[in-house]
Amino acid sequence: KDISHPNLIRVFDAESSDDGHVLVTMRYVQGVSLKRSIDSRAPIGEGFALREIEPLFLQLRDALIELHPSMVHGNLKPANIIIQPDFLKITDLGLAEFLPPETFARAQRGSDDAVYLAPEILSGSAPAPSADIFTVGRLLSMMLIGQAPDDASSVKFYAGDEEVDELIRSTYARATDQ
């Protein structure tokens, strides 16, 4: 599928072998993965400022708008988002589509990145756009509060502004029925 967007890595070729191996050839880009950026801040309890998050999520949104009519990423996670100065690139496009859903799910369940994947992906269902949207929510949570929480009342928000912190907390609580 020929998809071209400035925030999507260029995939040159993809094929799967009879024995289930997948080979995807894509453009190499330099930068820092979002995973590395999140991991470097976690030990010191530092989240991302809203001014840092907004441009990244606008680019992420635009990329998914372009991607979703043709395919689903299905394996969107911080390690697959490369941050360059003032720009991001989403990598590993289509990997989830090349493997049988149960095989992909089995490979992901034990990984540290499983927290970012939608429950339907981890249960072995085929990826859908809603799975990528779930991941965007998890990414936002990790960047704002340093964790993917199950309980908003135990979360320390990092926006640095009490009014913004309370707005985020109340929005999160409504969204998760807490």
Image: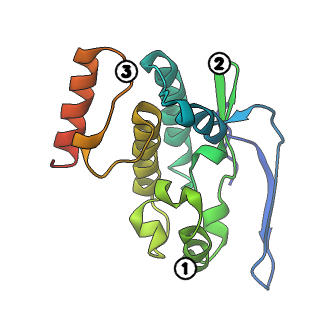
**122 sits left or right of 41 in the view:** left
123 and 26: which is toward the camera: 123
**As shown in the figure, which amino acid type bears the numbered disc 3?**
Ala
Q: Earlier in the sequence, mark 3 or mark 1?
A: 1
Residue that appears at 56% across and 36% down: 43
Q: CA distance from mark 3 to mark 1?
A: 39 Å
Tag shown at residue 102: 1
Tag shown at residue 159: 3
Q: Which secondary structure lies at badge 3?
A: loop
Residues marked 3 and 1 touching at CB (< 8 Å): no
From this viewpoint, is residue 74 visible? Answer: no
From this viewpoint, is residue 22 visible? Answer: yes
94 and 45: which is toward the camera: 45
Q: CA distance from mark 2 to mark 1?
A: 37 Å
Q: Earlier in the sequence, mark 2 or mark 3?
A: 2
**46 sits left or right of 164 in the view:** right
**162 sits left or right of 4 in the view:** left
**As shown in the figure, which amino acid type bears the numbered disc 2?**
Asp
Image location of residue 21, percent across then percent down: 78, 75
Task: Describe the colour scheme in one phrase.
Answer: rainbow
Few, some or many residues within 10 Å of mark 2 (<14, 14–19, 20+): few
Q: Which residue is mark 2?
A: 86
